[in-house]
Each structure stands twice: as C-alpha cells, then as structure tokens.
Image (spheres, rainbow, N blue to C red):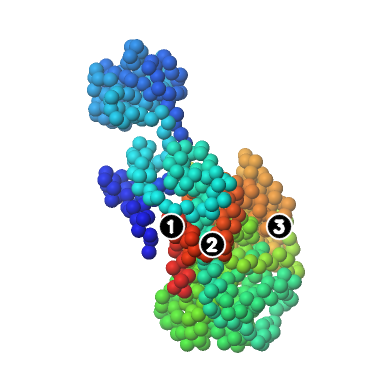
Amino acid sequence: MRPEILNPLFAALTDLKGVGAQLAKPLARLGLERVVDVLFHLPTGLVQRHPVDRLDDAQPGQQIIVTLTAQDYRSGRSPRAPFGVDAFDASGDHVRLVYFGRTSGLAKKLFPLGEPRQVSGRLDTYGEMRQIVHPDHVSEPDSDAAIATSEAVYPLTEGLTNARLTQLVEIALERRPELAEWIDGPLLTSRNWPTWREALTRAHASPHDAAAHDRLAYDEIFASQVALMLIREGLRKRKGRAVAGDGRLIDALRLPFGLTGAQELVGREIAADMGRETPMLRMLQGDVGSGKTLVALRAMLAAVEAGTQAALLAPTEILARQHFATLQAMLAGLPVNIAILTGRDKGRVRESTLMGLADGSIDILVGTHAIFQDAVTYRDLALVVVDEQHRFGVAQRLMLTQKAARPPHLLVMTATPIPRTLQLANHGEMDVSRIDEMPPGRTPVDTRVVSVDRLDEVVGGLERHLETGAQAYWVCPLVAESEMSELAAAEGRAALLRERLGADRVGLVHGRMKGPDKDDVMARFQAGEIGVLVATTVIEVGVDVPAASLMIVEHADRFGLAQLHQLRGRVGRGAAKSVCLLLRSQNLSETARERLALMRETNDGFVIAEKDLELRGGGELLGLKQSGDADYGLASAEQLVRLLPVAHDDARLFVERDGGMDGARGEAVRHCLYLFERDAAVPLLRSG
C-alpha cells in the first residue's frame, strides 16, 4: 500500500478546483493527470522581465513590465483581422497591444478605456510603431497579483497557457509533505544538495539550478537502483531448486560446428547457476550471430534431462516462429517435444498445446507474451529464457517466473551489447555473461557509406546481386510518405523496386501489417521466392536468412548506431561475403558523420554500444525507453551517466549495510520508491 503521507500527491488533477474536462485534455496530452505529474513537470526556460516606467527606457525585443492606459480600440476590416488597443505610458508614449484570432472581446475586457493596467510582454516594432503582441500578463496596478520579474517557462501544448500551468505547479508544491531524508548523509553533504522539498522549489524557480536538478535526478535514479537491488536480494532469499541434467540430450545434439571457447565458458556459468537452489537470474550478452540460441538450447535441454520444462519468450510473432523453426531443426531426431504458442494460435491447436503443457508432454514451449497468460499452466516449469530482453520490463519478466510452483531459473538474452551504465540502469539485478567471440565461418560484413544521390547505381548493383541468386534487404525508416518528411517510405521504395526488378522479386514488411500477412512475406523470403525484402526496422532483430548477403539502409544517418549494428547483423549469416550499404543524406551533422564512420571501421558491437552512448549525449539512451520499467522523466542522459554509478553504490550500501527496508533508512527509502513509482517490482517479487 502507498504510504498515506503521499496520497495528496497522487490525487487526480480533475479533483482540484478549476480543473474540468476541458483543461484535463491538454494536460493529459503532456502526461499530466495527477498532482505528482505536475510536481515533476519541470520548466525548460526562464523569462526575465524588466520593469520600466517609460517605453523609451526599453529596447525592442525585451520582455518588459510597464503601466499603460488604453485610449482607443482598432478593429480590422474583417473579423479575422488582428484587433488593436492603442495605449500610452505615463509620459504619453504610444504602444499598440495586438490580439489575433477573434479575441476583441477579451482585449476590451482586459483594457477598459481610460483605466491604467500593469502589462507585461515582449516589446517589438512594426514599421515605425511600437507594439506588444498578446501581452502575457495584465493586472490592475494595485492588485495583489503583481507580475513576477522572473517566470519559469514550461513545456506546453495547445489549450494550456504557461500562467495556468504555473498555478497548478503552485498547488502541487503546496501539497509536498515533509519526508525524512533517504540519501546517505555523507553523500548529501559532499554534494551540497538541498533537501527534496527545497530542490523542487528551486528546480521550478529556475532550470539553471544544477544542484536542485541533480538532486531530483539522483532521487529518481536511486529509486530505480534500490528496486533492482531489492529484486536481486529477494530472489537470492527465495528457495528454488537445483536443476542438473545427465547430458544425454546435449551429447546427442548433432551440429555442423563445435562450440567456441566463449560459448563453453558461459555454458559452464549457466550450468553452475542452474545447479544451485537459488534461482538463476543471468543476462547473456552476445553480438549478432555469436551463438546465443545454441547456448540457450543447451540450458533448456539440461532442464528437460532433469524431468522439467523450459519456456522461451520472444518479443514478436516473427521472432517466436523463427526460434521455433530453428530449435526444431536443431532437435531433429531427439526425443524432445517442442511447441509454439502465440496470440494467433486459436481453437484446437491452442487447446492441445495448453493440455500438453499442463500434463508435461510438452518439454519446451516457444512463444510471445501469450505464454504467461492466465490460461497457461505448466506441469513443472524450471527454466525461462527471454530473448531480446530489452523489449520486456522487470515486471513482465517476473510474471513468467510466477508460472512455476517454485521460482524457475531465468536466463535473458540480448544481441544489443549494453554499456555498463545502461546495464546498471536497467539490469542491475542480474549477473552478466558475455559471448565475445564469433563462431568460425562468420565473415565480417563489408560496410560502405554511399550518398543517396547514387540511388540509381545502388539499384543497378542490387539487380546484378539478385542475378547471382543471392538475396538482399532494403530498409527504410518510414512506412508511408509524410508531408513533414523527405524520408523515403518503405511502400514507395517497394513500388519503385518492383518497377525496376519485377513485382514477384520484391516483398514488403512493416509494423502496420497484420501478423499472417507479415509471416507469409517472411516465409517466402526465407524460402528464396522473393529476392529483395523492403522493410522498416521490423526486421531489426532475429530474422535469419543465410542467403541474404546484401543490406541496404536508406537514410542511414537517421538511425542510431545500435539500430544500424542490429540491421547489419541480418547479413553475413551464410558462407558468401556480405555487404552493408549505408545510404546517407547530402547534409550530415557531425554526430551522424561520426556514427557512419564508426560503422565502417568496426563490427564489434560492444565498441559500438559504448560509442553510441557517448554520441547520444543528452538524447534518448539506447534501450531506456524500451525497458518497460526504467523510464526516467527527471534524469537526463548526461545525469544518468554521471550519477548512476553513485546511486548504484548508495543502493548497495542501503541493502547490505543499512539493513534495507527493515533498517533505519527503510521508511524514508520506501517513500522514495512509491514517490517515483518504482515499487511495482517489490510486491511482484514478494508474491512470487
């Protein structure tokens, strides 16, 4: 239960006086639905106003506060024309106050003729005349509502004014409770940070108060780190069961290649974890094509050898069906029953699968999130493998682990190499294994950067490539043409290529297609019936077509490094030499130039991930917004990089030295967890 002291902050904004359905709509567009949302909606700018007695004392372009008296109204020739109010300062200097958009009634109400008003706004000139367009504040000179010389500027949307949002912020600030300090005392002192309450006051007063903003960012990061630490600690305390196979199925695997040293090493780490009663919680990082699926299969076979079941969770229908086909081929001839379950499976097929899971006749289940729905029960689930785990949050991962009578072992895999900072941010509760060695026969992909001006040459080269019997991908960033964008759309590009290469040689997949249609195109491409697959980034992860040895990425400068690396990983899976062509725009930013240069220089995903983090700087971090739980609203990317290691260490001190939730800091930290809504994982953990 949320601590009662925080309830005023979690009240709906519509419970506040003056916030009706009309105002609620623009607030909701900004994600502001509760008082706490407004509290954490910090300003991005600051308006400084200069009080002047005479207009002659101000410069054009300045934000000013001045007392004016309206003398006349100026209506336009049509109702749509701007409405003007001719006003004068104390010395008789003239300025016209201009209102657009049928607001004459408002202007007349604000400026009764002959009555002085205190006015603030930007002073400009129009020809020889001074003017203020839409003054931002108008009040009576002796009123209590004095116009502030300094005002914070908030992110807004249509239908919401800065003044109205500022009023809501004031209400939110008034509702702040007095909370005990959750940051470790020496750390707070060394950083010279204000208290939580003071930090909010200062952050709303100025976006330039570094100490206040760092304090709030730290609180948010710290809450996430504590949540992950508590999950890890709780998992260590929960009693699972040791799962050890006898090797008969693993030894029977007939593969055309042996394991790399890195695969053997991580295999031993996983086997050691599964052999303990403490449930495994391990992340397997491996670059595209490094052989993670084989390592996961061996772990699943160990579970089957021990008389238990295993499940593999994939983020998309395409990827789930591909995993199923790959594992079926690897398991050919072995006495292992493998099945698939996705949201599309209905009727008798679904019923049969559910029965097989319940009675234990199905050993390994592959599927999408459908595999942890309420109707799905397992006879004895001992191992859960999650592929492309950055698509799933902590809560989703734990939902699947609750499908077992005792906590199963959990292995999560990612082909996105993760820098240490992000690993701590999203996956601090996990042990980590890395496959940093590629299997023999994987030829590095030759990456080239080509100007989009040479599109005709590229299409000609693609035509020659297809004539050899090879296949290719062509990736576009959009599904359909947009009036706001010059980017080539997948649909438009597919039409052009069909015209040049023949309609039957070009397939198209994108995220808006229905599952069966998408699967049909992918199946035809995998079977070699389609020569070139035009796609959006729906093919970024997992799709495996060994005959595809050419990847063309249009407007590559618009993609992030991690995405480009994932896309490049779709080729180079067969014996043929593979090429990745990155088509760039004419005008490149310095960052885009660096990205493309790095893609040319290295195939090492870990190098690329670290550089991606560095280049993105203040932008959105790789994986952060995809993780489901680690959604940072206050902490910028720069603050994450700088403050996360500190928060990680403080969270560890809290759990290991200070007694965790039962210690002296426990109550204060509990408030922090609920305040930043990082509490969801803890009940999940306890009920699991």
What kind of element bears circle 1? Answer: helix
Vertical arrangement, residue 331 with respect to residue 30, above or below: below
At 71% from the left and 74% from the top, the residue drawn is 264
Name the residue type under label 2.
Answer: Asp
Q: Nearer the viewer, residue 110 or 321?
A: 110
* Residue position for label 2: 658
Most distant residue in the front direction: 664
Q: Nearer the viewer, residue 247 or 593?
A: 247
Viewed as shown, does residue 480 lie left or right of 440? left
Name the residue type under label 1.
Answer: His
Disc on the earlier residue, 1 or 2: 2
At 28% from the left and 20% from the top, the residue drawn is 116
* Residue position for label 3: 603
Disc on the earlier residue, 2 or 3: 3
Q: In which quarter of the image is residue 443?
A: bottom right
At 54% from the left and 79% from the top, the residue drawn is 240
Q: Is residue 609 visible?
A: yes
Percent coordinates x, y for residue 234 in the rendering? 52, 70
Vertical arrangement, residue 521 with respect to residue 347, above or below: above
Percent coordinates x, y for residue 89 in the rendering? 34, 16
Viewed as shown, does residue 91 lie left or right of 436? left
Disc on the earlier residue, 3 or 1: 3
